Structure formats: structure tokens, C-alpha cells
Amino acid sequence: MKVTEYWDAVAQTYLDLFRDEFDDKPFDLAILRSFAAHFQQTRSVVDVGCGPCGALSRILSGHGLTVTGIDISSKCVALAKTEQPGLDFAVMDMAEMAFSDKAFDGLIAYYALHYTPLSDLPATVSEFARVLKPGGRLLLVAKEGDGEGWIDDPLGITDRVFWSAPSLNDLQNLLTDNGFTISDCQVRKPHAQEIDVRRIYLSAESSSARIS
Ligand SMILES: C[S@@+](CC[C@H](N)C(=O)[O-])C[C@H]1O[C@@H](n2cnc3c(N)ncnc32)[C@H](O)[C@@H]1O
């Protein structure tokens, strides 16, 4: 099953389960506050793989950022638009974004890379660098792993799902190989209600001078 088909199929269930999940996650709220605080005035940010909830776009918008959420699943984007009226969402592949070079001051990718084969990750992160202004800020959040393969659907809706999860070291190399300078790296244990793997939070700046 292709990633678009999978997310179109599970979007409503994911929304029902996770609509307000970040409101109860102080660690994530602090990371997002810190990401937003980096910018000294209103700045444009793209939330790649925004999902059907659009919650991260909402939180960053609440911190004064101008946010565009993109997702490869048209169902996810349709639901996000309904959930977060007034915010901007578009159907787009994060590996090939319809934005000009240096379009954004910031980019967040929150649990969005797990459906991309490991061999395609360098091109995707290179695309992140392309749409960021020099010195632009990246926040990459991922579950820790050690490879890729087909797993049982965690949501129990479809049969098997392709899943990739690089190690912390691989993620760090992925960023530095694409010209990012890592400014912060945090790893937390899963919360009680989460899948039992550690969560990686990498903040980085694209090459060249700071923007603010
Ligand atoms: C686990 S959800 C995370 C949603 C949201 N970021 C969050 O943390 O709540 C992963 C999302 O990434 C999207 N996605 C996967 N591959 C993508 C791609 N190549 N381009 C854009 N979105 C993608 C999926 O459609 C899905 O909505």
C-alpha cells in the first residue's frame, strides 16, 4: 500500500485518536515554544507531514508564526483544514515541494520521515535545506530506530505498513551532510501511552548566517 493510500485510509481514525495529543505533552510544548522563540518577529514556517489534526501548525501559529502545513495525503489535508479553520494547508510531497528556494524561515518535520525509505532520506533533507532561507531553523522529531521494513499497522486498520526509523547517529549525519548545524539534540523516553521507543528531537540551522 502506498503512503498516500495508507494515510487517506487511516486519517479519520488518527484524528479521532490524536486530535489534542500535544496539549497533554509538556515536553513537546516546550520544544515548540523554544522553536518559535528563536524567531524575533513573525516568520514563515512549513509544517511538513502535518497530518489530519494540524495541531502542530495550530500551536506554532499560536506562538505568532505564519504556518503552512503540507501533507502528501489529500484526506489528511482536508481534515486539517476543517480542524484548523483559518490556517493554511496544502497537498504536497515533502520530497518535492512546490515552493521556491529559500521560501521559509523555519521547517518542522514531526514524525513525518518514517514513511520514507532510508535511501531516499538524503534527497528529502536536501529538499528541506532548499526551501529554508540561509540560517533557517529546522526541528526534526522522530522515533528512534535501527532500520526499515514492513510492520503490522500500529492503528490496526490495514495489514502491513512500510516503516523506516534511522538511529540518532544516522539522523545527525543526515542533517550535517546536508549543510545543517545541529544546535540542540534531546532524546526522551516514551510516555506511558506511547509506543515503546525513544523520541529524538533535533534542532538545526541551515548553512549560512542566522536570520534574526
Ligand atoms: C505520524 S503522522 C504525523 C502527523 C503530525 N506531524 C503529528 O506529529 O501529529 C505522519 C504524516 O506524514 C505524512 N507524510 C508521510 N510521507 C509524506 C511525504 N512524503 N510528504 C508529505 N507528507 C508525508 C503522512 O501523510 C502523515 O499525515
Image: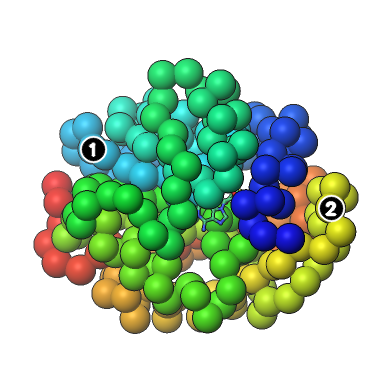
Q: Is residue 95 above or below residue 145?
A: above
Give the quadrant of residue 15: top right
Whether the residue carrying mark 1 lies under 8 Å from ligand 1 is answered with no
Mark 1 crowdedness (10 Å alpha carbons): few <14, some 14-19, many ≥20? some
Residue type at the position of mark 2: Thr
Q: Is residue 202 left or right of residue 163?
A: left
- Viewer-side residue, 33 vs 101: 101
- 107 shown above or below 87: below
Query: Circle 2 sits in a helix, a strand or a loop, which is it?
Result: loop
Residue at 42% over, 81% down: 173
Which quadrant of the figure contains the N terminus? Answer: bottom right
Q: Which dot marks residue 43? A: 1
Q: Please give left or right for residue 173 compared with residue 3 in the image.
A: left
Q: Position of residue 51 (x, y in %)?
A: 58, 41
Q: Which residue is located at x 68 percent, y 51 percent?
A: 5
Q: Residue at x 47, y 29 (%)?
A: 58
Residue picked out by circle 2? 158
Q: CA distance from mark 2 to mark 1?
A: 39 Å
